[in-house]
Image (tube, helix red, strand yellow):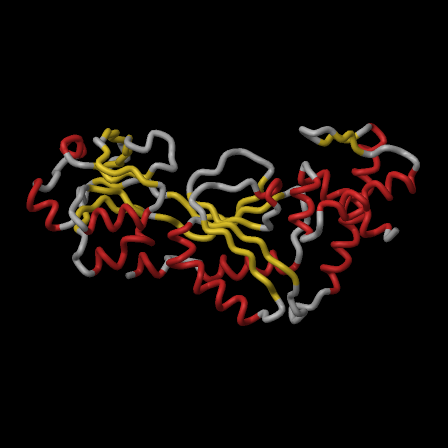
Amino acid sequence: MDRFDALQCFVTVVDSGSFTAAAARLDRAKSAMSRQVAALEAHLGVQLLNRSTRRLSLTEPGREFYERAQRILTELHDAEQSVASEHTSLRGRLRLAAPLSFGLRHLSSALDEFLLQHPELLLDLDLNDQRVNLVEEGFDLAVRIGELPDSALVARPLAPIHFKLCASPDYLQRHGTPLTPADLSSHAGLVYGNVSEAQQWRLLDTQGRIHSVKLPARIRANNGDILLQAALAGLGVLAIPTFISYQSLARGELVALLPDYHVPSTTAYAVYSSRRHLPLRVRALIEFLAQRFAGTPYWDRA
């Protein structure tokens, strides 16, 4: 039995909450993970995990051993990081989750550049507007947009995300231009469905006062590019991130509305688990993205 490998398997299983998630994180077979932990228990002569069909839990000896094993792996990780040169070749697999539109429009070119710089890296990319569970599904990192709930995750800000309230010239010619937030209630709304109270829009005026408007939803969708195409087709009014709409606004295909009001901004974050130590490749990608999107993003400069 490789004692270091067995320690790593055991700690990863505990952190992940299951053998399946731990196997995905370490890119191994679930059966191999189970054998390593069983061999470790046989070597120690104690049961470390209570296993059931629904969940895993630590025994009392397992809890004490987990804390010590975690410290051992931490010290080894820190020792490796301390001697790693900035020119060390990055290797291994990166599992990254990101929103679909942001991933296609802005993250893909950044990742291409990063991978060209590090040819021994492998990338496993999941583009989905539904949020994944990083720990249970074995992701190293996620890019997330919006408010983050309190959790065991660490969030590194990457870029501000601003919104524009807009519609196509054709739609405004047919339905009129709203002049106040209250006017929006008589317009067709194109609303993003992956947020609570999707049809309730909050606008801030120049004094910082909040104006809430509920729009009848002509289209409700979980992807911003679908809503953009609907707006370009003249189907309604939408509040959309500038990282999606900046080119259409610059070309005059969409018109910004209510200049004295704005949708509250939010932030794009790199999110990762605080329960595991970041491999050098993950830390390097976070730093690369933070530098790539630093300052005023190019889509807002446009």
**103 lies above or below 62:** below
Q: Residue at x 26, y 31 (%)?
A: 209
Q: Quadrant of residue 89?
A: bottom right
**198 lies above or below 177:** above
Seen from the viewer's position, the closer of residues 288 and 47 is 47
Q: Residue at x 67, y 42 (%)?
A: 20
Q: Quadrant of residue 299?
A: bottom left
Q: Residue at x 17, y 50 (%)?
A: 255
Q: Position of residue 85 (x, y in %)?
A: 69, 68
Seen from the viewer's position, the closer of residues 272 and 43 is 43
Q: Position of residue 295 (x, y in %)?
A: 41, 58
Q: Quadrant of residue 65?
A: top right
Q: Is residue 96 left or right of residue 230?
A: right
Q: Position of residue 137 (x, y in %)?
A: 59, 43
Q: Position of residue 56 (x, y in %)?
A: 72, 31
Q: Is residue 7 left or right of residue 254?
A: right
Assign the C terminus to one quadrant of the image.
bottom left
- Total marks shown come to 0
Q: Is residue 137 left or right of residue 236?
A: right
**85 lies above or below 228:** below
Q: Residue at x 23, y 44 (%)?
A: 165
